[in-house]
Amino acid sequence: MTLHIAGAGMAGLCAAVRARELGRDAVVYEKGDRPGGSMLISSCVVWRYRDLDEFRNECPGGESDLQTQVIERLDEGVSWLRLLGAEVVWEETGNPRTVGVRFDPRSLTDVLVRAAGEVRLEETAPADAGPMLLATGGFQGDRELVREHIAPGGELLVRSNRWSRGDGLRLATAKGAALSRGMGEFYGRAMPAPPAAVPEERFVDLAQLYGRHALVLDDAGNEFTPDSVSWSEVDLVQSIARRPNASAWYLVDEEALEVEIRGRTVREMVEAARAVGGDVLLPNELGVEIPGAYRYAVHVVAGITHTIGGVRIDPQARVLDGDGRPIEGLYAAGADAGGISAGGYASGLASALVFGRIAAETAASS
Ligand SMILES: Cc1cc2nc3c(=O)[nH]c(=O)nc-3n(C[C@H](O)[C@H](O)[C@H](O)COP(=O)(O)OP(=O)(O)OC[C@H]3O[C@@H](n4cnc5c(N)ncnc54)[C@H](O)[C@@H]3O)c2cc1C
């Protein structure tokens, strides 16, 4: 029977290619006018923690049997992408906690689309078409679902492809699917706040990645940095989301401006925010008492890249109902499948690759 796949991003395309390898017909439906989803506009670093203990340590709220699959099956997934011909641009992640590679996102998308077979753009999968894989990329683009589950203090900047609006989640829950852990969590970045103009091709280089080196104040001038900000700063971005207007001021001193983070200095990140019309003020222009001497105050807003909670799946990528039983013929992968990195942050591309391939294997053997 044909596997119907909703979403031509990382998870959906990997599933289609794997299904065809296993002799199973697959059709990919893509709501947008191009394939690739957020994968195409991402930094495209596909990575995992070194071992399960480290993964558990970093993402303690996640399901350990799903995390085990990522640890055990990512490397073969990466080798498989290489064999398909995807171009690798970095052989390592540059982060001692993790192992992985960086692909060229355009090459990866093109290679997968070529091998995926039928990809129908600007179409959604027919309801009840038969076995279906939900790979629609999460619910970050749907204000109502974001309000319900994440409860931000203002409008988040949607830092993802513009079509991921919770279609997978809605379809699955209508069929009785259970929700995963971590429904209120998301992966995101602090971005220049409005009136800054932040087009999707600048999502990577406009990220303001220096919250750990800044004094962080909310719009009312209250300091609120979490006790210890994690290396990914996801915890800080989630707390910014819950402050008034979902925004904050990052105050940086001369020393912080020279710190280099992932190949760029803080000064360069601040200047990039200013250049797109972001508010970069002198601290005394904020109108609040500031403890210490700072050079600039940069206005940032929480940007949401993808949701961490979603549909609950088992290690075979089968969607589970409220009693923990698989719903026949329904699979989920990528950001639609939740609870893998709850409590922290892990590579969304890695889980999309791993569970996309697993979903195809499970469907092929059913
Ligand atoms: C700027 C940026 C940088 C990033 N950097 C990294 C990184 O370096 N490493 C990493 O691991 N992750 C990174 N990510 C996250 C990563 O891109 C996602 O985790 C990954 O793409 C998720 O895969 P997915 O298949 O679930 O979703 P996507 O790849 O986004 O694909 C989902 C697809 O579903 C489509 N769709 C939505 N609704 C429907 C529907 N009803 N029917 C049919 N199609 C539908 C969408 O249009 C989209 O094409 C980054 C993301 C962004 C935006």
Image (cartoon, helix red, strand yellow):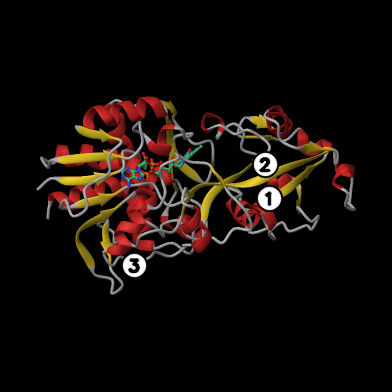
Residue at 35% over, 52% down: 167
Residue on which disc 3 sits: 178
Residue 352 location, x and y as percent?
35, 46
User: The disc labelled 3 sits on which kind of residue?
Assistant: Ala
Label 1 – label 3 distance at C-alpha: 32 Å
In front of the other: label 3 or label 2? Answer: 2
Q: Which residue is mark 1?
A: 247
Q: Is residue 8 among what the camera can see?
A: yes
Disc 1: residue Cβ within 8 A of ligand 1's nearest atom: no
Give me the C-alpha separation between circle 3 and circle 2: 35 Å
Q: Observer-nearest residue: 89 or 160? A: 160
Residue beneath disc 2? 193
Label 2 crowd (10 A; few <14 / some 14-19 / many >=20): many
When asked about the image quadrant of residue 303, the answer is top right
Q: Are the residues flagged by discs 3 and 2 in contact, CB closer than 8 Å? A: no
Contact check, label 2 and label 1, Cβ < 8 Å: yes
Residue 189 x %, y %: 59, 44
Residue 204 lies, in percent from the top left, at 55, 34
Q: Looking at the picture, which amino acid does disc 1 mark?
A: Ser
